[in-house]
Image: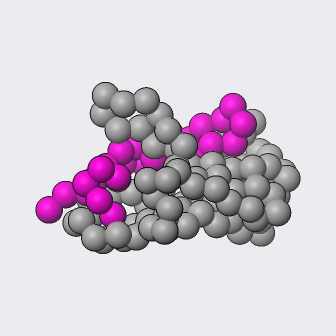
Amino acid sequence: QVQLVESGGGLVQPGGSLKLSCAASGIIFSIYTMGWYRQAPGKQRELVARITPDGSTNYADSVKGRFTISRDNAKNTVYLQMNSLKYEDTAVYYCNMKINWGQGTQVTVSS
């Protein structure tokens, strides 16, 4: 059974940073592309960043240069380092692997 468990969300001021983690179990983590998505109130869930098994990455235009996705295959964990956070980054952030989703972690950017 696949489990994805996010952590690291919270309340941060504009311009601040947070690092999200997603611990995976029940899969051979190293062979899968992993993704971070987010969903703001009243909006559709959108891709934030994705990382392939060989470490190739892609990002939504809105987060390029501010967010960094990485993975540690030894720890079965994918990370999302978020810098220079903006109000519009406020959302529930979800970890994804194919059809599997985590429960989400809330990120709120507010002064």
Residue 92 appears in the figure:
yes
Looking at the image, the residue that sits furthest to the front is: 61
Give coordinates of residue 34: x percent, y percent: 69, 50
Instruction: Please name whichever residue, 46 or 97, is drawn nearer the observer in this view of the structure.
Output: 46
**Height in image: 3 above or below 19?**
above
Q: Position of residue 33 (x, y in %)?
A: 75, 50
Side of 68 where 44 appears, left or right: left
Q: Quadrant of the N terminus?
A: top right
Which residue is found at the position 30% from the left and 50% from the top?
88
Residue 45: x and y in percent read 47, 34
Q: Residue 78 in the image: state x and y as whole percent.
A: 64, 60
Quadrant of res 30: bottom right
Q: Based on the displayed image, in which of its 4 quarters is residue 52 positioned?
A: bottom right
Which of 17/77 is in front?
17
Instruction: Tell me if 75 is positioned left or right of 53 in this view.
Output: left
Residue at figure coordinates x 82%, y 63% from the top left: 54
Q: Start and end of the magenta stretch?
A: 85-111
Viewer-nearest residue: 7 or 69: 69
Q: Is residue 5 in sight in this rendering? A: no
Q: How many marks?
A: 0
Residue drawn where x is 64% and y is 56% of the image: 58
Residue 108 belongs to magenta span: yes
Residue found 60% across the figure and 37% down from its top: 101
| Location of the C terminus (image quadrant) | bottom left
Q: Looking at the image, what colour scheme do you see?
A: one colour
